[in-house]
């Protein structure tokens, strides 16, 4: 059975018009009374509502100030960060990666550690507002250890396609073979050996200045090479 829809019609005749007017007036009076009662209630209770509101505002302001203070303290701490070669040598692989990330943050890069299984030749990825993205392959070795060309090959192959990087760099607390350094120089894969690491981490030189990085000039080369 089809359900009939209820339709409103206009009042007809003086009695219906008068009834509609009375109902409308009653609704307006009721609305006014409810509004008056609400205002009266707020008027009587606002002192009790004010105290919790002020308390909540004070707690919120304290929490925000605490966050700002912590960030400022961390920024100031990182700005003074210096790490010696002896400290690097005493680290394990994971600590070495986190130390490089902190140094990147010190230099103005938004860095994060991503090293681990399936990292695709990236242990630290950092972004810079003007210089783009850099991928860091960290190679922590024993004193006297050398990094070969294969490490640079791997970084070259994944920097653009996998990480959309503008720059790639291999960083070690040891040294690199002559072939590795020469290959990196030819193919725009930067490298930081023990001597450069000391200039960067211990003496306070910025990595992008040490390597001569320029704004967003590497990405197309990495992509074409893939």
Image (cartoon, grey):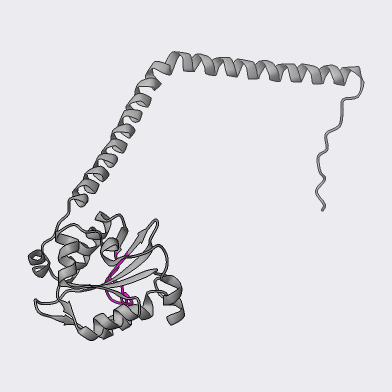
Identified at 33% across, 34% down, the residue is: 60
**121 within the magenta span:** yes
Identified at 43% across, 17% down, the residue is: 45
**137 within the magenta span:** no
Q: Is residue 52 above or below residue 138?
A: above
Start-end of magenta stretch: 113-125
Identified at 35% across, 21% down, the residue is: 51
Please state, as top left, top right, bottom left or bottom right, where the C terminus lies in the image. Answer: bottom left
Q: Is residue 28 above or below residue 180?
A: above
- Look at the image and tell me whether residue 148 can be seen: no
Where on the picture, by quarter, is residue 15?
top right
**Residue situated in front as seen by the camera: 11 or 99:** 99
Identified at 17% across, 54% down, the residue is: 81
Q: Is residue 200 above or below residue 29?
A: below
- Residue 108 horizontal/vertical position (percent): 30, 54
Spot the residue most to the right. 13
Q: Is residue 93 above or below residue 208?
A: below
- Look at the image and tell me whether residue 69 can be seen: yes
**Residue situated in front as seen by the camera: 48 or 210:** 210
Relative to 112, is 87 on the left or the right?
Answer: left
- Residue 120 horizontal/vertical position (percent): 33, 77
* Main SS class of the magenta portion in the image: loop
Total number of numbered labels?
0
- Residue 109 horizontal/vertical position (percent): 31, 57
- Residue 99 horizontal/vertical position (percent): 19, 62
Relative to 111, is 215 on the left or the right?
Answer: right
Relative to 106, is 18 on the left or the right?
Answer: right
**Residue situated in front as seen by the camera: 54 or 91:** 91
Where on the picture, by quarter, is residue 23?
top right
């Amino acid at each position: 059975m089809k359900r009939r829809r209820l339709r409103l019609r206009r009042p007809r005749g003086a009695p219906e018009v008068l009834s509609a007017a009375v109902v409308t007036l009653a609704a307006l009076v009721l609305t006014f009374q409810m509004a008056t009662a609400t205002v009266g209630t707020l008027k009587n209770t606002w002192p009790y509502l004010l105290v919790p509101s002020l308390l909540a505002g004070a707690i919120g302001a304290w929490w925000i100030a605490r966050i700002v203070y912590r960030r400022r303290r961390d920024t100031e701490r990182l700005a003074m960060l210096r790490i010696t070669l002896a400290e690097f040598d005493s680290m394990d692989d994971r600590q070495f990666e986190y130390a490089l990330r902190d140094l990147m943050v010190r230099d103005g890069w938004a860095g994060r550690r991503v090293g681990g299984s399936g990292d695709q030749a990236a242990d630290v990825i950092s972004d810079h507002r003007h210089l783009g993205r850099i991928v860091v392959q960290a190679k922590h070795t024993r004193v006297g250890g050398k990094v070969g060309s294969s490490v640079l090959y791997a970084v070259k192959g994944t920097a653009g396609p996998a990480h959309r990087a503008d720059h790639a760099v291999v960083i070690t607390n040891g040294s690199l073979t002559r072939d590795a350094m020469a290959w990196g120089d030819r193919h725009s894969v930067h490298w930081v050996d023990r001597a450069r690491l000391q200039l960067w981490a211990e003496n306070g030189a910025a990595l992008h200045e040490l390597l001569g990085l320029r704004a967003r000039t590497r990405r197309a080369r990495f992509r074409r090479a893939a």
